[in-house]
Image (spheres, helix red, strand yellow):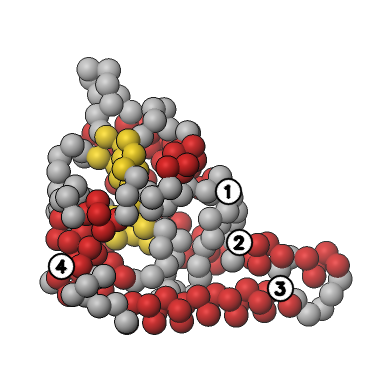
Amino acid sequence: MSTVSALKFLPEFMGQKRNTFAEGEREVRQALKNYLRRCVTIVNWQAEGQPIIAFVNQVKWDRDVVLTFNYDMLLERAMKIAGVAAGDRVLHLHGSIGERTLAYPTYKKLAYKNTRSTLAKRWKDAFSHLRNLGRADRLIFIGYSMPPSDFEAKGLFNYTDWYNAYDSAGSYSYQILLVNKDPTVVGNYSFLRRPPGLRVETFASWISCGEVSKAT
């Protein structure tokens, strides 16, 4: 999606009237939305959906916030099944399938007016939540590889890290944890001032230990 989005500017420089890349981007975006909608509808919540339900039930919704780069509405569906009403505590920073605009993990995701008008407030809200991490126990990254091209995400968490890094005793006031099957993603988090903790396992395996609700 990032590549197709970038290519849509070529016809303007090449003097071509028809923008086949823009058409392609729209088609791929719609296909992605349809695919993700279908994936959510066929989830067996008594089987593969159980880890999502467990996650929803372990989050402390009165204080925790979930920032997601996923487009699907799987989490919201799980919250509805679990009887949890905390949709305002879930921020889709790249947009979601219910919206016309989707952002891709590139350095220019907020450069376009339509994307910025849709998502800018969410990024601002995300920073507002993150800048007071002294009140929180942990910052947990589940599954996101933090690709090098995602400058906006790196900037958000890098500034947060510098804003909150030390308490009055001169030590980190919160824990940073990565949950990812691929240990090589740790290098993508090198912008943080200390190496984060790493759990090399699947989301289902990690959530089964009740890790979300633990204080440390």
Q: Earlier in the sequence, mark 2 or mark 1?
A: 2
Question: Looking at this view, is 117 or 166 the one in front?
Answer: 166
| Mark closer to the chain start, 2 or 3 | 2
Neighbour tally class for label 3: few under 14, some 14-19, many 20 plus, Cα within 10 Å: some
Amino acid residing under circle 1: Ser
Q: Secondary structure at mark 3?
A: helix
| Cβ atoms under marks 2 and 1 closer than 8 Å | yes
Is residue 83 or residue 113 the one in the foreground?
A: 83
Q: On the image, numbered disc 1 is attached to which residue?
A: 149
Label 2, label 3: how far apart the Cα atoms are: 12 Å
Residue 67, given in percent of the width and then of the height, sits at 34, 54
Q: Earlier in the sequence, mark 4 or mark 2?
A: 2
Q: Secondary structure at mark 1?
A: loop
> In the depicted view, which residue is nearer to us: 205 or 65?
205
Q: Is residue 206 left or right of residue 96?
A: left
Label 4 sits on residue = 84
- Picture coordinates of residue 134, whole percent (x, y): 23, 33
Is 21 on the left or on the right of 83, as rendered?
A: right
* Location of residue 186 with respect to 169 vertically, above or below: below
Mark 4: secondary structure = loop
Residue identified by numbered label 3: 21
Q: Amino acid at mark 4?
A: Val
In this image, 124 relative to 151: left or right? Answer: left
Q: Quadrant of residue 172?
A: top left
The residue under label 2 is: 2
Classify residue 50 by image quadrant. Answer: bottom left
- Pinpoint residue 173: horizontal percent, then vertical percent: 24, 29
Q: Mark 4 vs mark 1: which is more N-terminal?
A: 4
* Residue at 42% from the left image edge and 76% from the top image edge: 36
Calculate the distance from the C-alpha at mark 2 to the C-alpha at mark 1: 10 Å
- Quarter-wise, where is residue 68 in the image? bottom left
